[in-house]
């Protein structure tokens, strides 16, 4: 029987693109969602069912005729089920090439009956790790036979169908019915690609778990796996295609839990700016709990950030920093968007708005703007996860680093001038310092009353960033410059930076220190009557 079936199957594949007729299927799944319906559909097509353990029991209880894998191989399950599918008769049935005379001869010699479809998913390893189970329990969730069967079937996809995702059950059944029990080549190859992605993700998760137990710091190999979440409108420019992929197993994901309530599809640049806005709101909320916060981002840089007694006050103050740059920006707020805030946004061109919730009246007002993308993330802002890793792709590789969290406390900082900041200035200095860590280097932030009044970003010369921040402030909030506070993400290499800041009316400065000319910079601050604080920590953002 085996020789005849294999020979017939080989002839079928060579004669028609539709491939081998599915006569025998092996089903062995951990996630049993939809598997009974899938197996019943196969039986209706005349397919013989092979199965193992709990899956065989579930199918039999549903009234389906099932042949055990032990009966098929002639060898029992042993070691408590650890060994049940690792048998040459089974893997010969999966790997035999239907048009290869040598494979057919071996199959005949060993009485191997062909298996034409494999439906397998794996033990819940990731779920077990996430549940923080004991090491021994996690080890038992490392599937051996499952990945081996999947890979064997996927390698031989020209002759064997491999199904790993319950979402594929119904489409596969429909196509088998339509094609007389066969699947087209393109479908088999697509299912094989999905199968290899599935096992790659599984093996990567196992490695990451072992690496976490074994190594301190970054391990010798970097293993990440990403799943596509959505296609984007376009990339950085309209002629570029783009998609958003989420890292499997990441402690947090940019769009996890986010619901889009209104507006056009998101673009590549929208997501980059959304990440920047979300991160800064979370930074401000962590540093000053109990206050309302708002951040406006344009081209991945904040152009306004503020705290306030209400979300509307925070928005008004953030917008006032640089109304021109805020045009077409991304707005994130740390509290519910209410009607007063929605009304304040009328007439302002906003690309994306992110908030934890919206009042019914506010949502109604905002939806009048057809293209505004309204995003809701319950529970936002959230505290950053301690084990997050910042990845940046470079040519042929990935740069990985721990997050640049602003963890410096006031009591750890050093006042290096004879003049000390007063309490209001300390509040503004710490606020500006947190914002500055989210501005592209060279970064300068001028703040007053816990709102930005001028931001200088991305200049090759630090003194140019100081000039830019002062010019922005003069253009919109000149009255707030006198007595303002300034933050610099890295040390001042020359005292000319202090001279420009003093001319603008800055009264206090916070910076890391560490320049060979620190003493000259301190002396310039003393002469200008500026209080200066050293943090000892740099926050470059390239």
Image (cartoon, helix red, strand yellow):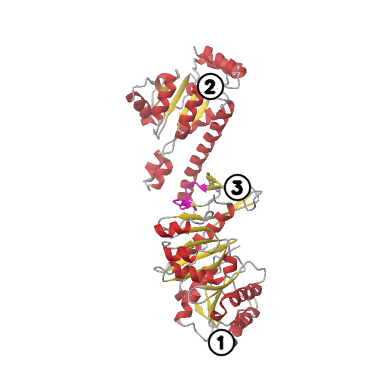
CB within 8 Å, label 2 to label 1: no
- The percent coordinates of residue 296 (x first, y second) are 53, 64
Depicted 185 relative to depicted 450: above or below:
above
Tags 3 and 2 touching, CB below 8 Å: no
Measured from the top left, where is residue 12 in percent x and y? 58, 16
Residue drawn at the location 41% of the way across and 41% of the way down: 139
Label 1 crowd bin: few (<14), some (14–19), many (20+), radius 10 Å: some
> Could you tell which of marks 2 and 1 lies nearer the N-terminus?
2
Does the image show residue 367?
A: yes
Whether 92 is drawn above or below 245: the answer is above
Q: Earlier in the sequence, mark 3 or mark 1?
A: 3
Judged left or right of residue 36, residue 294 is right
Q: Which quarter of the rendering shows the C terminus?
A: bottom right
Kindly report the distance in space between the C-alpha atoms of the residues bearing marks 3 and 1: 52 Å
Query: Is 461 or 268 nearer to us in this picture?
Result: 268
Tag 3 residue: 242
Indicate the position of residue 536 as horizontal and vertical percent values. 53, 73
What number is the disc on residue 179?
A: 2
Q: Magenta residues?
A: 246-261
Which residue is disc 1 drawn over? 529
């Amino acid at each position: 029987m085996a020789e005849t079936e294999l020979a017939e199957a080989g002839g079928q594949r060579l004669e028609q693109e539709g491939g081998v007729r599915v006569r025998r299927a092996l089903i062995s799944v951990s996630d049993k969602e939809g598997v009974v319906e899938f197996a019943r559909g196969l039986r209706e097509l005349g397919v013989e069912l092979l199965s193992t353990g709990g899956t065989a029991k579930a199918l039999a209880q549903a009234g389906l005729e099932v042949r055990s894998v032990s009966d098929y191989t002639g060898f029992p399950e042993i070691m408590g089920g650890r060994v049940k599918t690792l048998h040459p008769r089974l893997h010969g049935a999966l790997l035999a090439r239907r048009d290869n005379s040598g494979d057919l001869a071996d199959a005949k010699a060993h009485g191997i009956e062909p298996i034409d479809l494999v439906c397998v998913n794996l033990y819940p390893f990731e779920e077990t790790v996430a549940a923080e189970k004991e090491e021994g329990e996690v080890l038992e969730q490392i599937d051996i036979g499952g990945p081996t069967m999947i890979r064997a079937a996927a390698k031989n996809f020209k002759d064997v169908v491999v199904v790993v995702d319950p979402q594929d059950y119904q489409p596969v059944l429909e196509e088998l019915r339509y094609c007389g029990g066969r699947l087209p080549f393109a479908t088999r190859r697509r299912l094989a690609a999905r199968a290899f992605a599935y096992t790659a993700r599984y093996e990567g998760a196992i490695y990451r778990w072992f690496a976490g137990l074994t190594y301190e710091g970054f391990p010798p190999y970097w293993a990440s796996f990403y799943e596509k979440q959505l296609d984007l409108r376009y990339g950085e420019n309209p002629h570029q295609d783009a998609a958003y992929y989420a890292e499997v197993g990441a402690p947090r994901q940019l769009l996890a839990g986010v619901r889009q309530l209104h507006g056009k599809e998101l673009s590549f640049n929208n997501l980059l700016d959304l990440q920047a806005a979300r991160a800064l709101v979370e930074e401000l909320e962590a540093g000053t709990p109990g206050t309302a916060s708002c951040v406006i981002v344009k081209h991945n840089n904040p152009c306004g950030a503020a705290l306030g007694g209400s979300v509307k006050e925070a928005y008004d103050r953030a917008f006032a920093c640089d109304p021109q740059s805020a045009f077409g920006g991304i707005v994130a707020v740390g509290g519910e968007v209410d009607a007063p805030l929605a009304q304040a946004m009328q007439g302002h061109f906003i690309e994306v708005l992110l908030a934890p919730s919206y009042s019914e009246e506010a949502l109604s007002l905002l939806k009048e703007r057809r293209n505004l993308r309204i995003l809701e993330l319950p529970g936002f802002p959230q505290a950053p996860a301690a084990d997050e890793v910042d990845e940046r792709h470079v040519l042929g590789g990935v740069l990985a680093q721990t997050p640049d969290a602003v963890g410096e406390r006031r009591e750890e900082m050093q006042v290096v001038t004879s003049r000390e900041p007063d309490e209001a200035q300390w509040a503004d200095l710490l606020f500006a310092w947190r914002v500055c860590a989210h501005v592209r280097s060279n970064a300068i932030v001028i703040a007053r009353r816990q709102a930005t009044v001028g931001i200088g970003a991305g200049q090759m010369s630090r003194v140019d960033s100081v000039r830019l921040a002062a010019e922005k402030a003069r253009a919109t909030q000149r009255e707030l410059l006198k007595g303002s506070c300034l933050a610099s993400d890295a040390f001042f290499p020359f005292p000319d930076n202090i001279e420009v800041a003093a001319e603008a009316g800055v009264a206090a400065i916070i910076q890391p220190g560490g320049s060979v000319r620190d003493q000259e910079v301190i002396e310039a601050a003393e002469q200008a009557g500026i209080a200066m604080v050293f943090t000892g920590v740099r926050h470059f953002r390239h």
